[in-house]
Amino acid sequence: MTESPSDTSSETRDRSILSESEGQSSFSSLSSSPARESCSLLPQPFTPATLLGPERDGPSLPAGLPCLPKNDNPRVVADQDIETPDNWVKRNPNLIRLTGKHPFNTEARLPDLFKAGFLTPAHLHFVRNHGAVPRVSDEERDSWKIRVHGLVEREVDFSIEDLARLFPVVTLPVTLVCAGNRRKEQNVVRKSLGFSWGAAGVSTALWTGVYLSDVLDYVRPVRGKAKYVVFEGGDSLPNGPYGTSQKLTWARNKDKGMLIAWAMNGLPLEPDHGYPVRVVIPGQIGGRSVKWLRRIEVSHQESQHYLHFWDNKVLPTQVLPDQARGEKHWWYDPRYIITELNVNSAIARPDHEEILSLDVDSGEYIVEGYAYSGGGRRVTRVELSLDQGETWKIAEINYPEDMFRAVCHTDPVYGTLDLTERDTSFCWCFWSFRVRHSVLAECDAIMVRAMDEGLVLQPRDMYWSALGMMNNWWFRIAISKTTVDGRTQLRFEHPTLAGAASGGWMERMKNEGTDILKPSWGANGAGSLSSRAPAPAQETPMTKPNVNRNITMSEVQNQDRAMPWFVVKGEVYDGTAFLDEHPGGGDSILLVAGEDATEDFMAIHSPEGRAKLAEHHIGTLVQRENAPTAAEPETDSAPENADVAFLDKKKWKSVQLTEIRQLNHDCWIYRFSLPAESQPLGLPVGQHVFVRLRRKDTSELVQRAYTPVSWHGALGAVEFLIKIYYPSPGYPAGGKMTSGFHQLAIGDTVEMKGPLGSFEWKGNGTAMWKGVERRINKLGLICGGSGVTPILQVLRRVLHDKTDKTTQLWLLSANKTEADILCREELDALHAAHGTDRFRLHYTLGHVPSKWKYGIGRINEAMISQHMPGPSDDGLILVCGPDGMISQTVKPSLRRLGWDIERSLVVF
Ligand code: MTE
């Protein structure tokens, strides 16, 4: 039975109340006055400063401790958030958003973070959210419970007030670091599975709460059986709530400093940081510090939460992203999990693009930065090299965390801030190195590395891995020199810029063809580094070595359509051979005939697809004077004319998402508005459009062909029915495109291009198929799952066509469960309106409900024979569904039933 700590008298924090006889009363009593009084143990008012409005800072700290940071609380919701589920969270608009608008993943500009000092104000603290922030009202906050259960002798639901009342309240300074900090450097080498953190995915705050070990002592884990403590957050993510775990022995060890925390720098947590309560795990990656804490389970096994396995890993360097995606065992191998942070450091000053005018006689410059390590280990050494790793000099280190070791401070909000008997180092330290301008004048790069008290030194070489995590090779700044008015100026270049911004020496040198895993600069450095680095960076070659023909863009454009040429990355390819064999159909080649297809091609092809392209390489694009250039397939921004159809075969055009409607557990309708309200889409019945979008998590551009589900004649808008392929153990990465759809928020845009397809239902019993017009009287339609969309377009056009009184229709729709049958209401209504003579409708299901009058099981030959028309000259079958259904069942069955499938089967 779950206990509830009773509302004791306001004699709070008396450990005697932790007796077994306590804790039986109902929680409703917490709204009574004694418990209310105990609120004084929490920062008051207990509402995030940004939600409350007034300027607020936490209670000040005594002299001798680092200063409390000045909050610059955002007052309004940032524009980018307005159309997202987080449109109530007030955020600093100057942070760098790393995954577009939503979810919110962000870091400050490195100089801003560094300037803020030891304690980071909430408005500059990095944020890592996997989904929308749970919105917690005052009432919900008051009744928020953390359920502690599992292998414990007493299961308890704690409110935050209970925790504050039952256990000593403590404050610890703790640096949180995202495991992806500095990932952009790995992504420049080779794109990993994660988004591009710069070097500011690290921040420090005073966290106030209670020790997890005290709570565990109270609930008494079952000896011998209990091994792990599992935490679960209150956010809703596609694969269930965020959760992860700790070994019980570590969680019970107070020296590890694990907290259940409700305040940050003396103020209630901000929504982005876990309001009203979170876990803080010092010395480990930020991913272990579960926000919006709902549940703690003491268990015999580690967390079974999806992201506990499918995130936060350093996989062996040879495992490339596609392989990792496809092979589950890497993720479940306990050897690859990341727990403690590794030693790391970065240079904050000089900043990227900083210019220094040298005064070689007397000038001095102070190079500065941060360093941290994991597991409570102290950074014992920070070294700088000004000669590219030949020699190293020791930097000064300042450990502001040590200031807390000298003073014991007690306060109603912070509780006890006492590090006097704590040896662990859970915070970043700052280092500096004074260097004469005359020395910098001779220097081509500055490099930094740190060592911790485990004598672990940051490595020279990058350990690239599929998730790009824990990147801690030497942080290097390149220096270039120019002379202005007789004075030498140095320009400093960081390795990368956070997020999508381009810049930094890594990208530049990669473009110049330099091996960026063995970087060296100037004469001093050339060849001075030999690399033992893994070499995952090789780009797939897309050219043939002996091809040296020069081709102009006008030659490409004037090529016969039967033998289409196109351009990718400045090279020309002959697409003729692809017309038949391309998995996306010949149309996808014809759409880019005569064009620069770089963006389209790179968006959807794997290294294998790219390697195949090399076989069709015929030359290199050259530009003649005044010849048209290989224009980027840019999005068209010309004003729209409402009378002219929206779609353009040659140009990507943007549409804006205005509505998302959920149909069932995995299917959604996405409605996009066209630029002009009364504009037709311009899509013939039976044809499709290409849709492309940029994934927010990976920044990848992905595109697929879709048939809208909106009415053929609809004006000013278009709707797509999308079945989302969520990540699952058998399909770990989820659908590449549909995951991108799932990330979209109202107001986002995608691009469309088309029409595309060789079939068209022209109306009045006429079809156009492979360029030949045919009279059709019998139309068989077969679809599986979301393959209903092109079928529905044709069906509607026939049955709503006043000039067509004769075309007969047969529809066979296969689905897993009844709930999966899409657009069923409309199908049934059409069937009811037109009768079986005109429209025969049959469904088949993998799992049938108790009352079911249609078919059972997968489509088979008998079903096709019974529910499709027989072969005839005026008959045609249209099919859309999974490849297996079409190639293994539909095609062979139709053949055996006497259909000439070359002539009479249209596969969408
Ligand atoms: N907790 C929940 N419930 N949901 C999340 O998405 N992200 C984790 C962790 N806790 C996350 C979470 C990750 S990966 C990190 S790095 C830290 O929160 C970031 O904490 P912050 O956003 O307060 O800086």
Image (cartoon, rainbow, N blue to C red):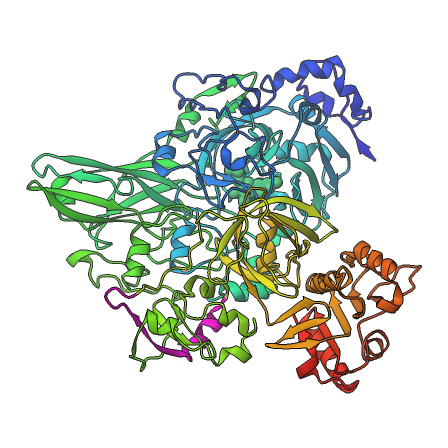
Q: Quick check: is 326 in the magenta stretch?
A: no
In the image, is residue 806 above or below residue 140?
Answer: below
User: Residue 698: x, y in percent?
Assistant: 50, 54
State the image quarter where residue 681 is shown: bottom right
Q: Is residue 802 left or right of residue 484?
A: right
Q: Which residues are magenta?
A: 605-627
Residue 257: x and y in percent read 54, 35
Whether residue 166 is visible: yes
Which one is in front, 306 or 890? 890
Q: Residue at horizontal 56%, vertical 73%?
A: 585
Front residue of this view, candidates 429 and 167: 429
Q: Tell me which residue sits at (80%, 34%) in the image.
A: 2
Is residue 887 in sight in this rendering? no
Labels in figure, total: 0
Question: Which quadrant of the structure image shows residue 330?
Answer: bottom right
Residue at the limit of the structure toward the front, as seen here? 803
Q: Viewer-proximal residue, 78 or 6?
A: 78
Instruction: List x then y, in percent, for residue 831.
Output: 85, 61
